[in-house]
Image (cartoon, rainbow, N blue to C red):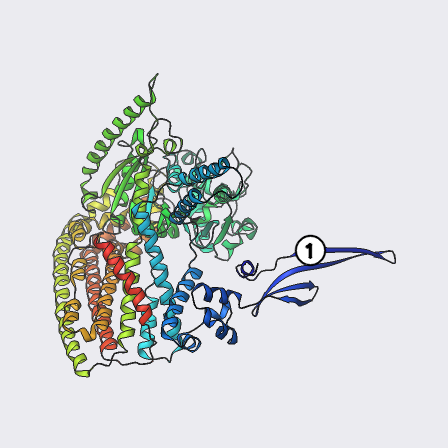
Amino acid sequence: MRHQVAQASKPALLLAGLYWDFTVSLWLQWWITCLAFSCSPSGWSLCYVFPGSCFPLLLLDMDEFVRSKLTEWGLSQWIEKFEDEGIDEESLYCLRDQEISELIPKVGPRAKFKEKLMSLKVKKTFPIQNNFYLCQQEQEETADSAEVLPSTSGTGVQQGKRKLDLQEESSKVPSPTSKQRRLYLENNMLFDVKYIMRYVYEELSKEEKTRLNEFLKIKISELETDKRELVGVFGKTGAGKSSLINAIIGEKKLLPSGSVSACTSVMIKVEANVRSSKYEAEIEFMTREEWKDELWSMSQYIGDNTDQERDKDDDYHDIVEKLSALYGEEWENKSTENLMDKKYFREIPEFLISNKKILTCETAIELSTEFIKYTRGNSKDGADKDIKRWYWPLVKCVTVRVPQNDLLQHVTLVDLPGNGDRNKSRDRMWKELVGSCSTVWIVTEMNRATSEKEAWDILENASSLMGNGGECQHIHFICTKTDVIEDLDDQSAAEVRARILRRNIGLKEGMIKEFNKLNKVKKQFSDGCFKVFTVSSYEFLKKKCLEKDDTEIPKLQDFLQNLNDCHSETINYVSGAHGILSLMQGTKSQLVADKKAAVCRQLEGKIRNELDEVRKSMEEANKTFEKCLTEGVEKSKRSCEGNLRSIIYPRKSGSSFHKTLKCIVENNGIYKPKKGKPINLNMKLSSHLTDSIDEEFRKTFPNEGKSGPYHGVINKFSLGTEELIQQNKDVELQLMFLKTEEEKLQTKLNRTIRKRKKTIYNSLTDTIEESMEKCYEKAAAFRGEGTLGNMRETLESHVRDKKHWMFESAKDVMLDKLNMLKEEILQRLKKTLMESMELSLRTDDYSIPDVSRELEMVKTHYHELINSQDQ
């Protein structure tokens, strides 16, 4: 009983109503008395609760938890001492080394107590719930116990039935693979070490502030990283994106699919909910100012259209769809100010104050029903036909969080529009997300995969954002609905399966041939990045003709699992913790100053030599870029006027081209139509600059981040600490810290390079856009008769006059950014390593707490991880 109470959630008030009724002087009086367990800082007590009062009738023994733990750990002889000092469960977790030494003066029992307490803290801090491996293990143990336990009651038949039931339950859970076991063990290691470092941080915070103390706390804080892999999912409406995502992550009803048309503007992220067991949707709106600007642009566009033009104008119909979704029929003949009235946003007060809206539900289907109005187009039938107002025109992004989903632990799937959006804030977010995707899935229907123009257009138009201007390492064409096949007649399931598989093989070969024709796209990516998958979400779930493996969804799940592999996160954290604890323990050593000084001199010389190698490698790369860009500048000067004319004098201009050109100049050279290819005048003008460096840029900054004159030289950087450790055992702990600092710094710098290279590459087009900005403003101001001619003349005149410095400026900006990256890398290498060396070998700080036990525990995990990596 006491144990059960101690394990209850705190604070808790468990009410049991006791109702007493009696009649006094014709009055019927009800006295309600509640029997309750009340948790106070002093422990658990059984109370009667009256309005405004509470007094204990029975006080449970508060030391029972501590007593049971000491008995369980074989330390019952110290129970009386713990009771005398008033140690209860809460204070047990707060004990520090000095207090433990006073409670248990003997070294042997004290060491045993500290280890058991540390393990108990880990379990309390990181409860493992719904663990696949543990469930399997528990079922196996239960099944085993059922075989050997003698029958104490009932018949042998009943006992046999219980055994069969247990075996049947156990058989429902597949045996864990070696990889799942490894991930389970590594997760436990990570939890252990994170708790230890949290404890060490708290101990440091209790000590006097010193330079070393503050340095160590910063280093512990920097151990925490949450790197998520982004997988961008492209594909037009009806291609099966939602069904594919639902099938892969095992949530049939999460993303709505079917007859309702998807909105082409809203981006949807799908990731794990690590904060609760609920299904959540976080809705991010554009700001009021952004929506007001868009309303003004839409009203201007509508005003420029004649009734005759409107019928054939997709962009006009797109605008009408947006306004009708949000305002119904009330938007017509109303000003921008009227349409910003608060009455239209009563359901979404978050929009008015620039906050995110959070939806929380118990099930996937409930959440899907709740957030459909923020992500989908209008529907005249179905469960959502009663929705009066649709808010997707105001939404930039919806983040859907799924509880207890292993595949999404470190992966976010992002459902992306194919061409971005005309709204600047949405387009900015789209570019950022596309550039951050390590993998891109382009989803298209099986029966039109090779000829589907839109799918290939997506790849071509976004290739520079994903490749040299992004982080993409994998391009996967995913052909859906492979189960759809015609002229089946009376064929058996086996014959249908064989026919589908033959067709899939042929399709893959055709897709690879098509990709190999895209020379401009291939310049952006490394060899082997392109793969084709032929999938069927329907057959994966129903299994009528195809085996699960035939649907290739398990292959995509395995791919996500590999992205999820937390091995690198675990080893980086544990290695860093090992280094920090090594330094802390090393400060306790009494070394001769001359010995430390000699090691410092060796390290300083090594740092200088290694920095020279880094500088040399990066400077050579930058000189190569300068040469390429010089050629690109000359080509750009010669061809820029022709490139401009190809945009502003198209072969099929039509009578409405003046509206297209108006959109281009009003949006800084960019036009994104509802249908068809987007137009980017800035990219067209900078095309010879980017073409001149594309291949060299991919070799210099590969998205894999392992080779090249930047990543490669960083990965080779070494202070030779392992050799120094062999020669200087007295400073082994300090050198171990320097070794882990070097490894952490390499990881951080590689991340910086991967992020910065996107800005460097995109600077060419960005500089051209800045150079054209005033010209666009001037052209956008024209109205009335002759507008088209005036816009063309303004653009041509500007390019003709400014071409001699515009492209030189773009070249200089990129070279400056490359040089700044080089200098930042050299500075960070020198500053970080010199500071680490100074504090580890030239500082004596005896206020640092003893962490010998913590070091041994982390060291054990560190070597286990290293050994598993070698295997």
Q: 647 or 220: nearer the eye?
A: 220
Query: Which residue extends farthest bottom?
Result: 593
Between 330 and 753, the one lying in front of the other is 753
587 relative to 42 in the view: left or right: left
Q: Position of residue 678 (x, y in %)?
A: 31, 43
Q: In which quarter of the image is residue 711?
A: bottom left
Of 483 and 429, nearer the camera is 483
Hey, what amino acid is under mark 1?
Gly
* Mark 1, residue position: 17
Q: Between 608 and 860, which is closer to the camera in this rendering? A: 860
Quadrant of the image containing the N terminus: bottom right
Above or below — where is 596 with respect to 549?
below
Count residues near mark 1 (Cα–Cα under 10 Å), then give few for <14, some for 14-19, many for 20+.
few
Q: In this view, does 136 lie to the left or right of 838?
A: right
Q: Dot 1 lies on which element?
A: strand
Q: Which residue is found at the position 52% from the left and 46% from the top?
A: 334
Q: How many labels does the image show?
A: 1
Residue 264, percent from left and from top: 39, 42
Q: Where is residue 9 in the image (x, y as percent from the top left)?
A: 54, 59
**Can residue 238 be seen here?**
yes
Tell me the quarter of the picture where residue 314 sits: top left
Q: Height in image: 169 above or below 473?
A: above
* Residue 565 higher or lower than 479, as above or below: below
At x 35% / y 67%, what residue is drawn? 221
Q: Is residue 668 visible?
A: no
User: Which residue is outermost to the top?
Assistant: 490
Residue 329 x/y as whole percent: 53, 40
